[in-house]
Image (cartoon, helix red, strand yellow):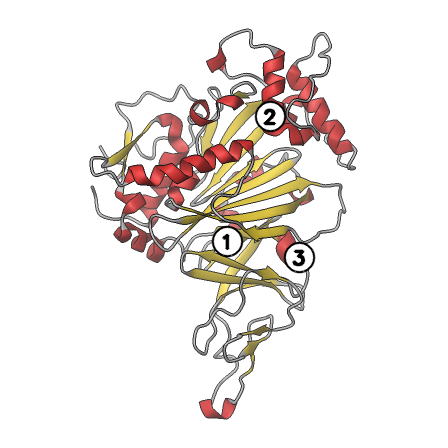
């Protein structure tokens, strides 16, 4: 039975699901054409990307008047600008003369939006202000030839865009996520880095890699010492989902009596920077009646206290835990008391390529001024760190398998409910031919 035919496809909404799953008569099947078919990609380009809210950048990218950021998704290009009046605006990045892109990349200090081709210019509010050799065009109304607007809004430090000017408001789009993460003062986070890298895979391959913990026992075996990947509850709204992951404890897959040293050493290898330490840092003494998770939490709190950040309101479980939010269609927001990571995939120009985007945010002391993040486009062979390199490795090998002629469907378990939910929503937005 394919996902398109499955009458139970909506049954997962609102359920709490762990690795033990729920009783189902068989796996959910997803047609492989969704990852490799130019026809399916054409439908996504028509019905999905011009109509959904997408994370474009951070507020730190466009914090001051004259700051701008270009967001690309396939052929789409959206220009985000902080106007002279301090307002954040977005426009389709196309000159009204011959269609050339007006700005590329990210930058600051703009006082106008001027096309480099023939030097037509607009105000930062999008109104046409100058046309060289204007007489040759006859009557040309400045209001009629303004830039085409797009929607832009923010949630905490994140900037979202939507080309559909009639779309629902962002806060409605986000459903219950803002309330669910209310424990986290997201306005106290600042973007440190945003890295964009080409990937030889469909955008869904990348997005789905951050939508389940089932793969941890496969490619992240070094993490089993410090994460419970089996009993991680999941929750679904209609469009989005979340996984609540307990860190600083060993996986049940390792059995009983896992040494504290295993928990500590694997944490240091994978996440030691959260304590300001590196791999191989010696484990501190664990006082009687406490756990290695408590020691890790104390280390995180002490490290950030040195930077003026108070994490004392969080208990030790919360301090070490992660809430992993999957935002339809293409973003994962990892929320921790000390940092937020945003992992997203932007569609490419073919079904077999996309861009992988990693944005890192750090919690700072209240009132810390904003600064320009390090933003870079990097080659495919860039190192992203110990754990992320393992994820990227799979991104690079998955697409070839999807093209093998015998593979018609992917088979998903209830544990992969957030992946199923992605495809359930693709059914609603994209539709398509049944397989």
User: Label 3, on which residue?
Assistant: 63
In terms of secondary structure, where does tag 1 sit? loop
Q: Report the residue at 44% width, 44% height from top.
A: 328
Question: As displayed, is residue 80 above or below residue 396?
Answer: below
Label for residue 169? 1
Q: Earlier in the sequence, mark 1 or mark 2?
A: 1
In terms of secondary structure, where does tag 3 sit? loop
Q: Which of the 4 quarters of the picture holds residue 85? A: bottom right
Question: As displayed, is residue 65 above or below residue 262?
Answer: below
Image position, residue 134 (x, y; %): 51, 89
Q: Report the residue at 20% width, 41% height from top.
A: 435
The quarter of the image holding the N terminus is top left
Q: Earlier in the sequence, mark 3 or mark 2?
A: 3
Find out whether the residues at labels 3 and 1 contact each other: C-beta distance under 8 Å.
Answer: no
Q: Nearer the viewer, residue 87 or 401?
A: 401
In terms of secondary structure, where does tag 2 sit? helix
User: Label 2, on which residue?
Assistant: 269
> Of circles 3 and 2, which is in front?
2
């Amino acid at each position: 039975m394919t996902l398109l035919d499955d009458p139970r496809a909506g049954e997962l909404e609102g359920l709490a699901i762990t690795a033990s799953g729920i009783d189902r008569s068989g796996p959910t099947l997803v047609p492989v054409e969704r990852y490799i078919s130019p026809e399916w990609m054409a439908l996504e380009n028509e019905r999905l990307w011009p109509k959904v809210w997408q994370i474009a950048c951070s507020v730190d990218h466009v914090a001051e008047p004259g700051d701008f950021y270009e967001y690309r998704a396939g052929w789409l290009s959206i220009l985000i600008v902080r106007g002279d009046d301090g307002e954040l605006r977005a426009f389709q990045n196309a000159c009204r003369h011959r269609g050339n892109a007006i700005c590329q990349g990210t930058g600051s200090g703009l006082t106008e939006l001027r096309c480099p081709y023939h030097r037509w210019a607009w105000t930062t509010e999008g109104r046409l202000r100058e046309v060289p050799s204007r007489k040759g065009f006859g009557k040309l109304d400045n209001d009629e030839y303004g830039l085409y607007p797009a929607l832009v809004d923010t949630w905490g430090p994140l900037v979202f865009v939507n080309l559909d000017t009639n779309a629902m408001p962002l806060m409605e789009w986000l459903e219950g996520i803002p309330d669910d993460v209310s424990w986290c003062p997201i306005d106290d986070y600042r973007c440190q880095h945003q890295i964009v890298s080409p990937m030889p895979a469909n955008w869904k391959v990348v997005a789905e890699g951050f939508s389940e913990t089932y793969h941890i026992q496969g490619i992240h075996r070094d993490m089993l010492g410090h994460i419970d990947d089996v009993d991680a509850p999941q929750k679904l709204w209609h469009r989005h989902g979340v996984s609540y992951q307990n860190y600083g404890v060993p996986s049940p897959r390792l059995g009983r009596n896992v040494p504290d040293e295993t928990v500590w050493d694997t944490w240091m290898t994978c996440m030691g920077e959260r304590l300001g330490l590196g791999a191989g840092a010696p484990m501190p003494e664990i006082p009687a009646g406490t756990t290695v998770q408590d020691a890790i939490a104390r280390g995180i709190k002490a490290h950030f206290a040195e930077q003026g950040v108070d994490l004392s309101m969080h208990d030790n479980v919360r301090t070490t835990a992660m809430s992993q939010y999957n935002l339809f269609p293409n973003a994962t927001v990892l929320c921790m008391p000390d940092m937020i990571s945003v992992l997203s995939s932007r569609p490419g120009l073919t079904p077999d390529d996309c861009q992988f985007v990693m944005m890192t945010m750090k919690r700072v002391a209240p009132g810390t001024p904003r600064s320009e993040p390090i933003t870079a486009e990097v080659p495919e062979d860039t190192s992203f760190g110990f754990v992320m390199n393992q994820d990227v490795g799979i991104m690079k090998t998955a697409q070839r398998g999807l093209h093998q002629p015998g593979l018609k469907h992917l088979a998903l378990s209830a544990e992969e409910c957030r992946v199923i939910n992605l495809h359930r929503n693709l059914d609603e937005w994209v539709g398509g031919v049944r397989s």
